Image: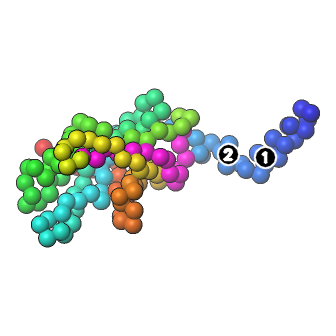
Amino acid sequence: MIRRTLLILAALVAAFPALISPALAEDPAKLAGVWKGEGYGCYDAKGALIPSYEQVRISYKDGVLIAVKIDRTPCPGLGEAARRAGVPSGEISWRSKIPGGSFAYDQAYAAESHLASPTGRLLWAPGQVTIKSDDEIVWLTPSAAGKQPIIFRRGGPAPIS
């Protein structure tokens, strides 16, 4: 019985080497740092999209990858109220559980993001995060379906003052 189990296990490892590949066991802690998210925007009075970006500080703690908003570019011509719209600085922008303490590149992970309601209250909305490389993370929410996703790249300019 033991021999048969070992033979089956050996056959599975041979057939699916990616299941135990060290390349798939990436440490999420290495994603820590400041990231710039592009793909955000504001709408002007005519409904035209004005591109904007958001800076976040990503950390990994207790199995969760967390992006805390640092700041966001103001929307030109829309004033301070538009700059403050959405998730306030210092709040979690999005978070994703990374099971087992490791991740695989190009695999989508369930996540959730904070969205501001019309009353200003923060609500959690479902989404997904895909880690494309050590320097690129793609964020997608159901509301962004069919639209360009938010792409976070490591670094970016200094926080907006």
Q: In the figure, 116 relative to 146: above or below?
A: above
Callout 1 amino acid: Leu
Q: In the figure, 50 relative to 115: above or below?
A: below
Image quadrant assignment for residue 64? top left
**Residue 83, magenta (yes or no):** no
Q: Position of residue 70 (x, y in %)?
A: 23, 41
Residue at 14% x, 70% y is 46
Residue for badge 1: 12
Residue at 39% x, 66% y is 146
Answer yes or no: do the residues labelled 2 and 1 have beta carbons within 8 Å? yes
Residue for badge 2: 19
Which region is colored magenta?
A: 102-116
Q: Foreground residue, 44 or 52?
A: 44
Q: Secondary structure at mark 2?
A: helix
Mark 2 or 1, nearer chain start: 1
Callout 2 amino acid: Leu
Residue 24 horizontal side relative to residue 85, left or right = right
Residue 22 horizontal side relative to residue 63, left or right = right
Question: Is the N terminus in the top left, top right, bottom left or bottom right quadrant?
Answer: top right
Q: Secondary structure at mark 1?
A: helix
